[in-house]
């Protein structure tokens, strides 16, 4: 079963979320639908949607003003959490070490981390895509895990840009990630594609080998855009 994960980033409201739930709960999705919402919107109930957060503290508890722990997320109903999104790596200087710590905290609380990796345009131009994503996967994943984790390949240059890599580029990146995971003993870990996914391109994207679903930003905010994506992913 493929994944359709929405990342609302710092958008939405309780009213918009309730309307999204109402419409998606009226469907019969053939995939796993997850919505990663701002912390304050966790706590809603849905029959068809599992909820997730977009970040988690690398600390268990304590004097970390403004941070939210994995146990708090779990208590608020989160089953998933995005860690190491490129916007966190870029604006909050999150390193692979920090991302790995966050993923560990999530796993300890029974939350599935969705660990993001992806190259910048400069790295792509310099021919470093394979090296960058390989080291990101190796260094951002907790060691000795056999639990549920998900990887999301998000080429940074395509996020919010309205452009997507070619099918060959996506297939190449996902193969490298799948091979790296296999080397780490993590065969079968789902690998999602994210960046400028929409209803028009999602069918072609999920047909690519080693693509186990999508992580959708802008197009997950409105039911009229998100629902056609859910319905196109089989
Ligand atoms: P867009 O779908 O808006 O390009 O965002 C992708 C993303 O960052 C999802 O995490």
Image (cartoon, rainbow, N blue to C red):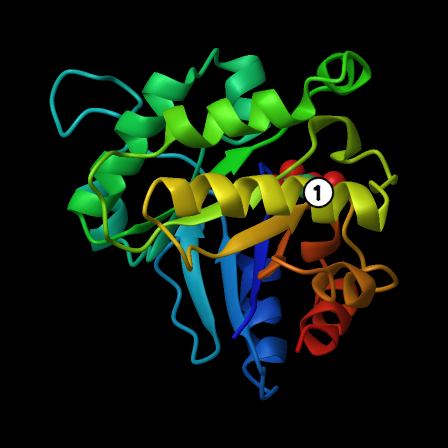
- Is residue 99 shown above or below 213? above
Whether residue 120 sits left or right of residue 188 in the image: it is right
SS at mark 1? helix
| Residue of label 1 | 172
The image shows residue 66, relative to residue 29, as above or below, that is above
Where residue 35 sits: x, y (%)? 52, 58
The image quadrant of residue 91 is: top right
- Residue 77 x %, y %: 29, 59
| Residue 10 visible | yes
Q: Is residue 215 above or below residue 225?
A: above
**Residue at position x 53%, y 52% in the image:** 191
Q: Quadrant of the C terminus?
A: bottom right
201 over 140 or under it: above or below: below
Residue 40 visible in the current orientation? no
Q: Is residue 31 left or right of residue 206?
A: left
Q: Residue at x 59, y 39 (%)?
A: 176
Residue 196, image x, y percentages: 78, 45
Residue 223 figure quarter: bottom right
Q: How many marks?
A: 1
Picture quarter containing residue 228?
bottom right
Q: Residues within 10 Å of mark 1 (few under 14, many from 20)?
A: some
**Horizontal relation, residue 73 to residue 181: left or right:** left
Q: As rendered, which of 116 and 61 lies closer to the eye?
A: 116
Looking at this view, is 26 or 4 the one in front? 4
Which residue is drawn at the image coordinates 63% and 78% (left, top)? 23
């Amino acid at each position: 079963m493929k994944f359709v994960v929405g990342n609302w980033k710092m958008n939405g409201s309780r009213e918009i979320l309730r309307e999204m739930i109402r419409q998606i709960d009226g469907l019969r999705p053939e995939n796993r639908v997850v919505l990663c919402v701002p912390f304050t919107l966790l706590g809603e109930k849905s029959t068809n949607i599992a909820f997730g957060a977009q970040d988690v503290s690398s600390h268990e508890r304590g004097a970390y003003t403004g941070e939210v722990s994995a146990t708090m997320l779990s208590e608020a109903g989160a089953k998933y959490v995005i860690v190491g999104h490129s916007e966190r790596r870029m604006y909050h200087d999150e390193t692979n070490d920090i991302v790995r710590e966050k993923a560990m905290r999530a796993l300890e609380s029974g939350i599935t981390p969705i660990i993001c990796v992806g190259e910048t345009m400069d790295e792509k131009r310099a021919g470093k895509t394979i090296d960058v994503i390989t080291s990101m996967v190796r260094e951002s994943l907790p060691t000795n895990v056999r639990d549920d984790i998900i990887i999301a390949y998000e080429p940074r240059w395509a996020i919010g840009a309205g452009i997507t890599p070619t099918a060959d580029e996506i297939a190449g990146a996902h193969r490298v990630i799948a091979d790296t995971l296999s080397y780490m003993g993590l065969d079968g870990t789902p690998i999602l594609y994210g960046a400028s996914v929409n209803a028009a391109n999602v069918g072609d994207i999920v047909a690519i080998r080693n693509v186990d679903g999508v992580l959708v930003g802008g197009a997950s905010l409105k039911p009229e855009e998100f629902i056609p994506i859910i319905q196109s992913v089989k």
